[in-house]
Amino acid sequence: MNAQRKFTLACFTVVILVTACLLTVLCGAGGLTWWATTRPTSTPDPETTARHLRVFTELWEIVRDDYLYPDHNGADWDAIGQEYRARVQAGLADEEFWLAMDKMLVELGDDHSVFLSPADVADEEQARAGEMEYVGIGVYAVGLPEKGYSVVLLALPNSPAARAGILPHDHILAIDGLPACCDEFGYDYLDRLLGPKGSQVELRVQTPGQSPRAVTATRALIREPLPVEARRLEGNIGYILIPTLWDETVVGRVREGLETLSAEGELAGLVLDMRINGGGSDTVLEGLLAFFADGKLGRYIGSWGEEPLRVEGIDVEGSQQTPLVILVGSETASFAEIFSGVLAEAGRARIVGRTTPGNVEITYSYDFEDGSRAWIAQESFLPPSGADWEETGIVPDVEIPLDWDEFTVENDPQLEAALDLLRP
């Protein structure tokens, strides 16, 4: 077992990456009654159980010794350990064991600590490298259990979804006649969008303010990362959509976007859209911050002490001076919240949109002998002001309390408010 990188990626957002076959197990998908309804599919041999016990023991001790909250976020970690040890000792198949370990971490209730199977680790590494590959229709979507449908965050350019006319903000009401959202535990059914290459999927879709419509899409092999969209708007104002801080190629693609926008003339202002960004890695965070700020921007704090968040500024076609507005919303989480908040505190940006969830714990990864991986919350973030963003979220300068499913690309009140702040 070895400790690795620092990440913060909100659990509720990771679930939505079903179109990349990525990682519904992260949040313990399968429901809270798993132990009552699932039994081993085979009798594991003693060697398998011994391996499971070694991984379990390492994981439990990591949380005991290094977890962010000394009181384990109110969980009785000793009792939880006894309960899950007994279940592991009783014998589990590999898949059941990996799910059990994720369930154990879910009991901490921090929305960040998760456990991944070896297959999930492989998918995670692909996503980090910007090399996602899957068969589907190319949408990035999330279930909204309180509303009974899923919403499209974006459709990949030239994907089956885009060719079928599916747009960001569209509601997915049904997939092949079955609900797109959600079971009794709040988990979506977006995995129904996946299937064999060349097969068709029938969707019932609704654009906000319009009537539902039927859409047919043909599944295809998708081999592209989430897009970084850069475009020039009226008044020489630039716009860049940054959908994730997980993908290590994002920094380079944002830089290319800045260069492309500036090639047409000096920018009067820049809108950075973080509304569907659920976080990612500290290396991507710091790489992006360096385009817009310089110096010490806050502190990471853990049981071991503290470490500054410090960047060395890089000016890309005037990016260090260009006036900024950052769009945030209910899907903006983790390092995306830190990105937005520190630029606001540094006086580099104003914030428009909806108050963010407040989910800024930082996790470290631990790899185990069976190829599995755990991400454990071990740090918090403290901005220069001392604000507790885990408690408050990032509060916009201009609050427009709309969610992504409540407006369209053509009618975006939050973007319009951002443009108003940047216009002369």
Image (cartoon, helix red, strand yellow):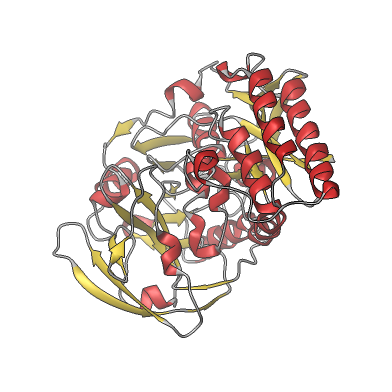
Total number of numbered discs in the rendering: 0
Residue 349 appears anywhere in the view: yes
| Vertical comparison of 118 with 345: above or below | below
Depth order, front residue of 213/262:
213
Q: Residue furthest front?
A: 43
Q: Residue furthest bottom?
A: 198
| Vertical comparison of 7 with 213: above or below | above
Depth order, front residue of 147/256:
147
Q: Where is residue 77, by image quadrant?
A: top right
Q: Where is residue 168, by image quadrant?
A: bottom left
The quadrant the C terminus occupies is top left
The quadrant the N terminus occupies is top right
44 to the left or right of 244: right
Q: Where is residue 414, by image quadrant?
A: top left
Q: Position of residue 169 (x, y in %)?
A: 30, 57
347 to the left or right of 420: right
Q: Which residue lies at the image location 75% right of the left edge and 51% below the top edge?
A: 44
Residue 299 appears anywhere in the view: no
| Vertical comparison of 297 with 241: above or below | above
Q: Which residue lies at the image location 49% right of the left edge and 38% below the top edge?
A: 333
Q: Position of residue 372 (x, y in %)?
A: 74, 49
| Vertical comparison of 1 with 170: above or below | above
Depth order, front residue of 247/138:
138
Q: Which residue lies at the image location 42% right of the left edge and 43% below the top edge?
A: 331
Q: Position of residue 159 (x, y in %)?
A: 44, 76
Depth order, front residue of 358/312:
358
70 to the left or right of 239: right
Q: Position of residue 289 (x, y in %)?
A: 60, 41
